[in-house]
Image (cartoon, rainbow, N blue to C red):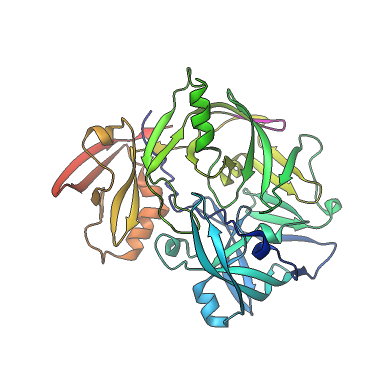
Amino acid sequence: MSSLYSKALFLLIGPLLLTQSIFCQKSATLTQRDFLEEIEFEWVRGLIFIPVEIEGKTYRFILDTGGTLAISTDIQEQFSFEQVAVANVVGINKLSKKVPYVKVPSVRFGSLEFSNYNAIVSDYSEYPFSCLAADGIIGRDFLRGLILELNLPEKKIKLSDNSLKLSLPKGGEIPVKIQRKTSMPYIKVEVSPFGKEWVVFDSGSDDLFSFKTKTIEQLRQKSRFKQHPVETYFGVTSLGSSGVIPKPMAAYTTYIEQLELGDAVLEGFYADVSKRSRSRVGTGLMKYGVITIDYQQKKFYFQPKESIQKATAMKASMGFLPRYEGGVYIVSALQVGSEAERKGLKLGDTILQLNQFNLRDKNENVLKHCQLYLNGYGWQENETTKLTFLSEGKEKTITLKTVKY
């Protein structure tokens, strides 16, 4: 099989990891008790956006069970919240960056009011964050002690502190482990033919399922890929929340016969490209059923549309992954042995034209860049991609066939 996933979420939102002493929200409070709150959300590139009110103004925040509260530099400049520390943020690639950490007096979504929560200050003005129009992140620090339901068909989330107010499924529950230092939720799934795996549920990722890179390497050493060979990608396949660009490295995918979640089965799909930090299930799962996380009783529920479903993770691939850096697009990662590599594309080459999108001009209309990013570079819709690139001072144009999964 060929190449990188068409979703190309190379700037992954979460998770955010902080030192425990800074992460702890000792003075944080939730005013309401015995409630059931329903909030409509927007669905953009597999991310959940909810309206959040700060100081009487409404913003668009990403709901990220793998992240913690973060606000944009624009919000901080407006309100000058008290800085309480400098936090060490560790992204998905285990690279860290120091950022300001401030206390936000009040955060509201729906009728719920949360007081005195600490927040990372992060810059969301750069591409591609600017295309998402994100103002911040609502994360796991708001969910402790609550029950969260995610319903994609209705585009609603439900939050409650009382299980009697939600119709929790009977049976099929999956145990949840809440990591002590980060409060991230882990669930146990069966990944055939590779066995059981504890994975983080991360709504800041649009993955259906992805392995931890080290797990794939360990399975390879045990010769576990006789029937389903591993596909290898080399380069930078994802940036973390820290925004620090990692060194080029290997990432992998392989065919999954079945992913079992309680009584539900998703079958016959290629996993999303592996991550350095941990194996995960993301919002890709929401396409197949309703998700409920009970942080009180430490249980995870998945109510599938059907008990057994054919699934799709990687949807299409062209053999390379682009990244916007320094005002130009470059080849961020290549699949080893792909058509793109065979036709001369190299890591770090400058992308000049991608189908109808002229990427030569740094001042090209930002809306066109966002159109390119938000539609997944058009790889799902196109049978072929015409690519013009600059490699070692020479310009070259090639046509690549789309490989669909």
Q: Is residue 265 magenta?
A: yes
86, 224: nearer the viewer: 86
- The residue segment tinted magenta is 261-266
Dominant SS type (magenta): strand
Q: Give the residue at x 28% y 44%.
A: 347
In the image, residue 402 sits, relative to residue 326, either above or below, namely: above
Q: Give the residue at x 31% y 32%.
A: 338
Which image quarter holds the C terminus? top left
Which image quarter holds the N terminus? top left
In the image, residue 264 sits, relative to residue 182, either above or below, namely: above
Q: Is residue 313 visible?
A: no
Q: How many marks?
A: 0
244 to the left or right of 192: left
331, 7: nearer the viewer: 331
220 to the left or right of 263: left
380, 393: nearer the viewer: 393
- Percent across and percent down for residue 55 are 64, 79
What is the residue that sits farthest to the top in this orientation? Answer: 226
- Percent across and percent down for residue 147 are 76, 53
Q: Is residue 114 visible?
A: yes
Q: Quadrant of residue 170?
A: top right
Q: Give the residue at x 75% y 71%.
A: 27
Q: Give the residue at x 71% y 51%.
A: 180
Q: Is residue 144 magenta?
A: no
- Percent across and percent down for residue 132 are 47, 61
In the image, residue 40 sits, relative to residue 227, either above or below, namely: below
- Percent across and percent down for residue 85 are 60, 72
